């Protein structure tokens, strides 16, 4: 996990009760595992919108359900249990082009 990612998690995580903290920490571990596996290259914010840069080839090979899982894991890890971002953007590490967008209420749309 990069320092930027850690700081973003620290600023965004909602850990007001012990059980919520465990859930948030578990999700953070899952998200970090995606980084270790090479899928997630970086995570940051553009305004209030999280932007996840992913390995283009690995992301393209994932089934839709797995892509949704990555978005849900980020919501849990960074927004906190029971909270969601309004929007999460997934971009290519090769071109920075959008690959998918997750939106609250409608879920994931793959470009």
Image (cartoon, rainbow, N blue to C red):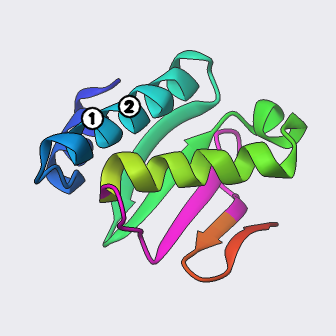
Residue placed furthest toward the top: 36
Distance, label 1 to label 2, CA atoms, is: 6 Å
Q: Quadrant of the N terminus?
A: top left
75 left or right of 17?
A: right
Quarter location, residue 18: top left
Q: Position of residue 67 (x, y in %)?
A: 72, 48
Q: Which residue is mark 2?
A: 26
Bounds of the magenta segment: 80-100
Q: Of the numbered discs in the image, which one, if any, rests on residue 22?
A: 1
Residue 15: within the magenta?
Answer: no
Residue shown at the point (12%, 49%) measured from the top left: 17
- Towards the viewer: 45 or 84: 84
77 left or right of 38?
A: left
99 left or right of 10?
A: right
- Disc 1, SS: helix
- Towards the viewer: 46 or 1: 1
Residue shown at the point (41%, 70%) measured from the top left: 85
- Is residue 17 shown above or below 109? above
Q: Of the numbered discs in the image, which one, if any, rests on residue 75?
A: none
Residue 89: within the magenta?
Answer: yes
Q: Position of residue 25 (x, y in %)?
A: 30, 33
Residue placed furthest toward the left: 16
Do the CB atoms of the residues marked 1 and 2 lie less than 8 Å apart?
yes
- Is residue 61 shown above or below 76? above
Q: Position of residue 65 (x, y in %)?
A: 79, 49
Q: Quadrant of the C terminus?
A: bottom right
């Amino acid at each position: 996990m990069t320092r930027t990612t850690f700081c973003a998690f620290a600023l965004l995580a909602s850990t007001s009760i012990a059980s919520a903290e465990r859930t948030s920490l578990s999700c953070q571990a899952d998200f970090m595992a995606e980084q270790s596996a090479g899928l997630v290259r970086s995570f940051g914010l553009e305004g209030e919108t999280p932007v996840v840069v992913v390995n283009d080839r690995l992301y393209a090979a994932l089934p839709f359900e797995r892509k949704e899982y990555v978005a849900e894991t980020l919501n849990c890890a960074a927004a906190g249990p029971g909270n969601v971002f309004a929007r999460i953007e997934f971009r290519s590490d090769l071109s920075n082009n959008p690959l998918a967008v997750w939106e609250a209420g409608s879920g994931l749309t793959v470009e």
